[in-house]
DNA sequence: ATCACATAGATTGTTGAACAATACTCCAAT
DNA sequence: ATTGGAGTATTGTTCAACAATCTATGTGAT
């Protein structure tokens, strides 16, 4: 009954499914979620005592969760003053777009060597967005747009790039909460998303990159304008 | 004595100089340093009790430091098992180069809009490297090469990109410790660094990008080869 | 009124001890 | 050689305490 013809070695490696998680990690996930969808407003102070009581965790565990989130720029830690939800400004939006341009344009340009179904994932996000528009689900359009750009980043086939994209988009979402974001912000870009996807699907990677660059220019301009006018307060 | 014509607003913003730091941050910095220059070997286990005794900090503070370093991929946290110095493999090197290509090539391509002395910083790193070679300081060549590529990333003028570059290069340095890195690994690239800088200095950004791409191909190939042969153990 | 200063209260920074839960080691048994 | 189990070591988490720092308030002097 030893290793006689078994196929254990052929089994897929154990994924993260079976990875248990610590309390601090779960708290960090919870905080991230609440920050991203606005339950915790930008600038809000996260009191150790109050949050600890709310989540039923000790201050030490909570502090570990804070440190876990520290590098994601969703929280700001001020020594001896506390932890606050980040409050991105116009400069942050500009910087976020710098990074997006670098990563996403690079991803599109190497689209020819993209992993198996990476382009298919982009198409799925396009249709997800169009479906949301069809039923007037503005929230859904925003979500689909996030998925779309994460899928674009996925063309790089790089775990590190995937995580970077996740972070960038999360931070951008936070920036949306700072200004009074119009519910149909993303709607105008749906057609462009479709166009870029079509170009990718036929292998016109440079043309897709040019089109994507146009999207960045337009979206960044619109965002920065919204910042420097309305949300100045 | 109120705000009569003072120039307080013209003063430079308070930098991080006056930012006090927590014990956990200092411990994290210390650990990062030790990991990067090899005092803590890849794969080494960081015992809470032993390290806490060594650094004279409590386990809780030490755990905060671990979480602070968590996102930098220099440490690996395995639940209920402990924290280990990361041990990058060949796939990690490949992924790191994917990111470097995306970021550094993008940086070079937008070199025309780079901040004031960004290109000068690259030149300084080139000379720093050549000076180190002149006195046979191989360690110094490696350090200068890091500075060189960080300066390349600096062309983007993006705080987020700067931090990303810092992290990528730190991780790459860790990968060097995994394999038996020859002391003169970087020496062959000094001339190429100089050539790229000269192209940047005259504004030939696309040519510089092509040259840089060549560097990536050569360096990645050499690294991966070193991994899959020698350091297989 | 405004400023300076002192005081008190609240919050964070850090420690140490304690206990539960899990992993690791080693030895016996089959 | 593998399995099972007891005992030990380490991590996960909480709690309580205290020092250090921030924040708000109040008082008095100009």
Image (cartoon, coloured by chain):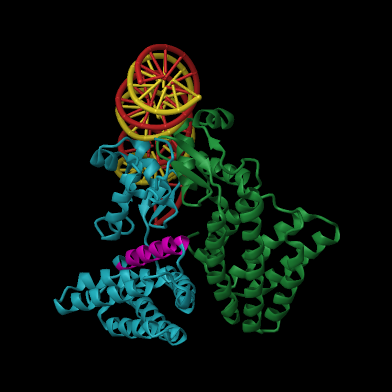
Chain colours: A green, B cyan, C yellow, D red
Residue B56 picture location, percent across and down: 25, 37
Give the residues in magenta: B159-176
Residue A77 appears in view: yes
Residue B163 magenta-highlighted = yes
Residue nearer the viewer, A20 or B7: B7
Image quadrant holding the C terminus of chain A, namely top right
Q: Quadrant of residue B198?
A: bottom left
Q: Quadrant of residue B52?
A: top left
Q: Furthest-left residue in view? A: B135
Residue B205 picture location, percent across and down: 45, 83
Q: Is residue B175 left or right of residue A51?
A: left
Could you tell me which residue is drawn at 28 percent across and 50 percent down? Answer: B30
Residue B197 magenta-highlighted = no
Could you tell me which residue is drawn at 35 percent across and 74 percent down? Answer: B227
Residue B83 picture location, percent across and down: 38, 49
Could you tell me which residue is drawn at 24 percent across and 77 percent down? Answer: B127
Residue B19 picture location, percent across and down: 35, 44
Magenta residues, dominant SS class: helix
């Amino acid at each position: 009954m030893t290793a006689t013809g078994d196929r254990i070695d052929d089994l897929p490696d154990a994924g993260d499914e079976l990875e248990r998680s610590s309390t601090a990690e779960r708290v960090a996930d919870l905080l991230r979620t609440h920050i991203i969808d606005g339950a915790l407003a930008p600038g809000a102070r996260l009191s150790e005592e109050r949050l600890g009581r709310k989540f039923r965790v000790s201050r030490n565990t909570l502090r570990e969760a804070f440190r876990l989130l520290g590098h994601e720029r969703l929280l700001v830690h001020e020594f001896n003053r506390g932890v606050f939800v980040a409050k991105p400004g116009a400069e942050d939006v500009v910087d976020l777009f710098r990074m997006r341009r670098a990563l996403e344009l690079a991803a599109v340009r190497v689209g020819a060597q993209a992993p198996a179904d990476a382009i298919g994932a982009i198409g799925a996000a396009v249709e997800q967005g169009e479906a949301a528009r069809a039923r007037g689900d503005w929230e859904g359009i925003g979500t689909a747009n996030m998925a779309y750009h994460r899928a674009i980043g996925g063309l790089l086939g790089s775990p590190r790039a995937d995580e970077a994209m996740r972070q960038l988009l999360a931070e951008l979402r936070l920036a949306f909460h700072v200004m009074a974001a119009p519910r149909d912000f993303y709607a105008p870009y749906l057609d462009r998303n479709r166009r870029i996807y079509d170009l990718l699907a036929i292998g016109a990677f440079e043309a897709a990159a040019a089109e994507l660059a146009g999207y960045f220019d337009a979206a960044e301009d619109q965002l920065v304008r919204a910042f420097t006018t309305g949300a100045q307060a």
